[in-house]
Image (cartoon, rainbow, N blue to C red):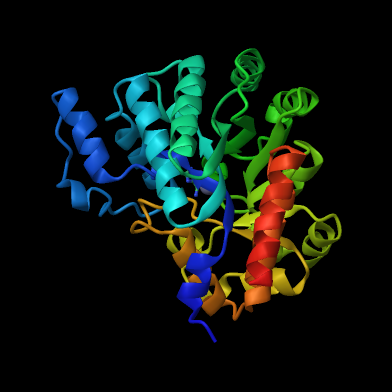
Amino acid sequence: MEDLTAFLTRLPKVELHVHLESTMPGELLERFAARQGKRLPRPADRLYDCSAEDLSDFLAFLDRICAYVGTPQELAEAAEYAALAAGEENILYSEMILNPTHWPQFTVPEIIAAVTEGFDRGRAAGGADCRFTLSLSRTQTGEEALALERTMEMHRTPRLAGLSVDGNEALSGRTGERFRPAFLAAKAAGFGCTVHAGESSGPEGVRDAVDLLKADRLDHGVRAAEDPNLVERLARERVPLNICLTSNLTLLYRRPEDHPLRRLLAAGAAVTLNRDDPTFLGGLTLTEELRRAAEFASMTRQELIRCQENAVDAAFCGAETKAALREALAEFQRG
Ligand code: ADE
Ligand code: ZN
């Protein structure tokens, strides 16, 4: 049988959970920094050898990284780079998350225009078909959330797919009620809604995401496994879980054997597999993330394909794009 890495390299891949902030290699940032007369704190090839101990440390590190991007043109270049890099490993479709609080140097309309332009250029040059969600930080106010949603409506582009929320729930506490009006407005305006939950929050964060924010999917969601009834509900309602094994084994689970990937698959949850923060995770590729998941949870090739199909089902794109992605997967299976 074909070796697993060769199989995964050839597999047409779809990802729904990767932060644009974590796709910029040190060399790109070094070039941008030089234009501002700045230097990176470490040589470019070791920029990400940081010692982020936990999620809060890591999020502060992301703020410092994003400051090296000085102009909307550079942000467009970073987005183009991300689309091309994804295309190189046969990711056909990628939905990236961008959190404007990491980018105080830009207005939200500037961000939307720059990322759209970068994704368009990347796609035209053979990269992945990329979309993005704009993400709230857990610590923002309800008014800020509504303002972001309104700006999204006013500056809609075909690549702006939805609203999300990320950051550290362990610090902010429950935010479901606070963000509910913005998420309901986004949904009414036709945007997809995705929520980081069940990473720095437990089952209650997952329930809030589904019940209060009406999330179409969950980013992570793994800590739902602490409540078997909730897992059974998520599987029954086919709520997609955008799981990031490598990220979770770095930032969340001290003991790998505690990660519930196998249990969630066995329960019939709609699992997708994702990179989350690739530069921070040693330049993680989706191919490698899938290989690790296969090894870690003894996943069959059929299960790995099923995760790609789940991602297509859960993607915030139109029926035509979904049909083309499904056809690529069907053709792959026909050999
Ligand atoms: N932003 C970037 N990566 C994140 C993560 N793993 N959890 C929450 N917010 C994030
Ligand atoms: Zn994430």
Q: Quadrant of residue 301?
A: bottom right
Q: Is residue 173 above or below residue 152?
A: below
What x and y, as percent, mark residue 157?
60, 22
What x and y, as percent, mark residue 108?
50, 18
What x and y, as percent, mark residue 53?
36, 55
**Residue appearing at x 67%, y 70% in the figure:** 333
In this orientation, does residue 203 appear? no
What x and y, as percent, mark residue 236?
86, 60
Residue nearest the observer in this picture, 302 or 248: 302
Is residue 85 toward the left or the right of residue 36 in the image?
Answer: right
> Quarter of the image containing the N terminus?
bottom right
In this orientation, does residue 103 appear? yes
Residue nearest the observer in this picture, 231 or 154: 154
Q: How many marks?
A: 0
**Residue appearing at x 80%, y 61% in the figure:** 235
**Residue appearing at x 48%, y 33% in the figure:** 119
Seen as rendered, the residue at the extreme bottom is 1
Q: Is residue 63 above or below residue 36?
A: below
Q: Quadrant of residue 274?
A: bottom right
Q: Is residue 284 above or below residue 298?
A: above
> Quarter of the image containing the C terminus?
bottom right
Is residue 232 toward the left or the right of residue 332 in the image?
Answer: right
Seen as rendered, the residue at the extreme top is 154
Residue nearest the observer in this picture, 47 or 83: 83
**Residue appearing at x 77%, y 27% in the figure:** 184
